[in-house]
Amino acid sequence: MNKYPLWKYLLVLVVALFGIIYALPNLYPDDPALQVTAKKAGAETAPDVLERAVAALEKSGISVKRSELLPGSALIRFNNVDDQINAKDVVQSAVSDDYVVAMNLAPNTPDWLVSLGAGPVKLGLDLRGGVHFLMEVDMAKATENKLKNDLNNIRDGLREEKVRYKQASKEGDQLRLSFTTEERVSQARSLLQKEFRDYLIQEEQADNVTTLLLTLSEQAVKEIKDYAVSQNLTSLRNRVNELGVAEPVVQRQGADRIVIQLPGIQDTAEAKRIIGRAANLEFRMVDWENDPLSVSRAPVGSEFLPMRSTGQGVLLKKDVIVTGDRVVGASTGYDENGRPQVNIELDSVGGKRMFRTTNKHVKDSMAVVFIELEPEKRTVVVDGKEVEKVFTKETREVINVATIQSALGNSFRITGLDSPAEAKELALLLRAGALAAPMYFVEERTVGPSLGQQNIEAGLMSLVTGFALVLLFMVGYYKLFGLIANVALVLNLLLLVAFMSIIPGATLSLPGMAGIVLTVGMAVDANVLIFARIREEMANGITPHAAINAGYDRAFLTILDANITTLLVGLVLFAFGSGPVKGFAVTLSIGILTSMFTAIVGTRAIVNLIYGGRALQKLSI
């Protein structure tokens, strides 16, 4: 007799319920939406911002499906993508520049499914959903950053070599070093020619002072620009990885632009803020030589910067100890008072600079300066015509001032942050790597199917048609056993969709659909082998129950061998492939595992329920 123990029937039932529940959210398609989020991390979106946005949309004649205020953002849903695209500029004009307006897909999954962790499958850019960003690197700022960093390094080098200089400054695209004796000029030249070979050196004299003019060579400028794009490309990839986006596209376009495509992402406002934000840190000494209350303006070599918490000016030395570029590790935590902090780890060069400076200034104060660069549109007059250009707006704030109790090394912490969200975002940006130069968004749009909507509809139609033909063939050729195989095939698809829905970062693309079609064929192939074996055994004259046992037992090894070899190919494709190839490998590998269960365990459970426990003379096969 063919019977399963109770636990096996319950296992099949639990797996079937799992597949149904976690595939169910795909019946509730996402709504096109706009998400309004404050630029500053941790800041809330005020209710009046949402009211202004909705009123502006009503005035423009754009219908709103639903609007809602969420923790940290506002969400406006639309009935179609056209309304979403038309509404973006309207909403951006209605809210202030302190908010980011990003196109999004808002889920419609019922709350009870969400509470179980269920959600729809994320679709790739070639099917539906995802965002396309085109960003441009500020090349002028890249060169300026190089000059500033080299100026600090030159000052450090001259001090180490004990070469006294009268003045060291940056003017335009040149560095100026002034000396009072020829011996010092010669020593400085020797240092520059040895360690700063990117510069062309000119000399001028006035009032017994010799000034060396340092200008970057054309080759050096070209290398700086290439490095800026390459470094930003690496940083953006790291930031995208921190966001957990599956199968992203981050690639260079032309001389100074980078394309970013984020398939299946839900929170595009968060992505836009993280990707576009250029944040860095500077560690500087508080001016220990001057009292800020007794000076009307900053002395030479110092400057006033506002304290974030109070807005009061802090007098700082202009010399930078280290910047965020030297950070190799950053994590969040809480100080002894329960306030958020960021734990910093510097590289060897940064650690040496920090130790050298703090060792000389024990009991003096050191400040942490937070620098944020963001694009700002301004109208300028060019050749008598008004032209809108994008400039870089730089904001500098002191977030922490602390007394140096002892010399610091590679590891220390930053406090004075507004919220845990800001601490988390700052740590993320520092971990991903500072941008070599600020960037601004040139273009932002939702990406439609890259193969065209008609091709995708044709692909779906072919999938449905092929599936239907397989179902009809199995019923027509294997009768009741064919119907059982069809039930298992439907369960297999439910399980495949369920796993694609719950695996973090999984995205279904057009090649992934090809993997599903292949899985359908392989799942049916397993049942064909089993049923053909059962027919063969019955033709040899054995009883129906014995034929069922022999069919499943003897076909198992053949099915296992075929599926293991295909699974190995899928794993190799996943390990060495990228983008669409990985998408195909994921669906193929998951489909092989689910088909093994449904084609063998699932169909056997149904056969045992129908035929087990009673005498048989023949089988409907």
Image (cartoon, rainbow, N blue to C red):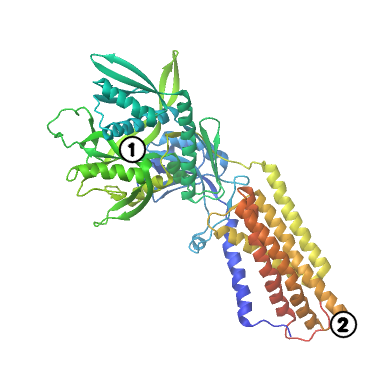
Name the N-terminal-most of marks 1 and 2. Answer: 1
Q: Which of 151 and 160 lies nearest the eye of the viewer?
A: 160
Residue 198 % position (x, y): 42, 27
Position of 12 relative to 589 (above/below): below
Residue 479 % position (x, y): 81, 70
Q: Quadrant of residue 575?
A: bottom right
**How far, Cα to Cα, is label 1 from label 2?**
85 Å
Q: Which of 212 and 25 lies nearest the eye of the viewer?
A: 212
Residue 117 % position (x, y): 50, 62
Give the residue type at disc 2: Gly
Q: Residue at x 31, y 26 (%)?
A: 188
Q: Residue at x 60, y 77 (%)?
A: 10
Point out the image quarter for the N terminus. Answer: bottom right
Q: Secondary structure at mark 1?
A: strand
Left or right position of 162 against 459:
left
Position of 467 relative to 47 (above/below): below
Give the residue type at disc 1: Ile
Q: Residue at x 84, y 83 (%)?
A: 542
Residue 268 % position (x, y): 48, 45
Report the residue marked by disc 1: 371
Q: Which mark is residue 541?
A: 2
